Image (cartoon, helix red, strand yellow):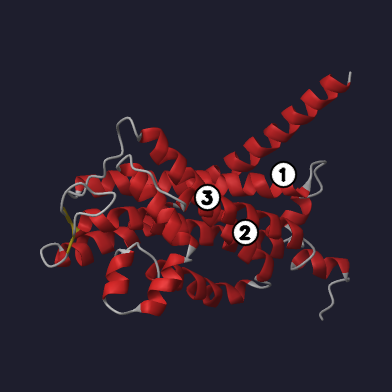
Amino acid sequence: MSGVARHRGLAHALQAMRAIVWRELAKFSRQYGRLISALVRPLLWLAVFAAGFRNVFGVAIVEPYDTYIPYDLYIAPGLVGMVLLFNGMQSSLAMVYDREMGLMRLLLTAPLPRAWILLSKLTATAVLSLAQAAAFVIVAALLGTALPVFGPHTPMVLLAAVCAALMLGALGLLLSVHIKQLENFAGTMNFVIFPMYFMSTALYPLWKLQESGAEWVYQLARFNPFTHAVEWIRFALYGKDPGLAPWVVLGCLLVFFVVACWGYDPQRGFGGLTKRGGGGG
């Protein structure tokens, strides 16, 4: 009988996760501007910035590349990471909004552990991130920058992309714990997104940073989790060993998610106001 109860409990948990994921997908399907904005940012870099420097900069024959490659092909994995990063951060806005409106408080009344509800929200974020990343890869190929996605290494690419999406989504979840009001969102996001992106290997290899004498930028890029997410995707695209990158990404994913679950307070925002009778302070 206990086995039957466990089976029903698991079925109920999976049903709840599916419902949360489908809710986020349905909401996203009505937000056409969200998909367009998610594609405009990386495509602008690819069509303008990378195209302008295509014949000026190139990447030497270093791992994971077997030949000299143009600059646009180098930054394409970083732009995939940009899509995952921006959607992961945008998910924190949705979490703050849901908490402000008391929706998360209602969701957490379900007879499921809080960590499972947050994991379901994280899964929904990762699914949306991967869908947007796939759309970017398709449009980039149409513009002439085709990434080697398909081949024997495809499972490695999918694993790297999924783990990167989960890690960046967990970072967004962690930030939503500390963003107390929607008004603070823009400043916090700019403080996180741009340093993570520019101080990484999304736009230039690590050895270029060190060679140019930017030692402090080089050290920050080395320890930037986003760097390891991009490098894992980049090496997976060419079927090469990514070294420590997967362990760094998975370790950060675990730390971000555990700390987010530990610190998440659904009583903030509107839920907290109603509990105090609508008063301030």
Label 2 near label 3: C-beta < 8 Å?
no
Q: Is residue 87 above or below residue 206?
A: above
* Residues at circles 3 and 1 in contact by the CB criterion of under 8 Å: no
> Upstream in the sequence, badge 3 or badge 2?
2
Dots 2, 1 in contact, CB < 8 A: no
What number is the disc on residue 247? 3
Give residue 173's mark.
Answer: 2
Q: Earlier in the sequence, mark 2 or mark 1?
A: 1
Residue 224 in the image: x percent, y percent?
47, 65
- The mark nearer the N terminus, 3 or 1, is 1
Question: Disc 1 marks which residue?
Answer: 116
Q: Residues within 10 Å of mark 2 (few under 14, many from 20)?
A: many
Q: Residue at x 59, y 41 (%)?
A: 21
The residue lying toward the viewer, choosing from 6 and 12, is 6
Q: Is residue 34 left or right of residue 261?
A: left
Say what amino acid the circle numbered 1 marks: Trp
User: Residue 7 is drawn in which quadrant?
Assistant: top right
Can you give x and y, in whole percent of width and height, for residue 4 in the image? 83, 20
Q: Nearer the viewer, residue 87 or 94?
A: 87
Residue lying at 32% horizontally and 59% vertically, measured from the top left: 42
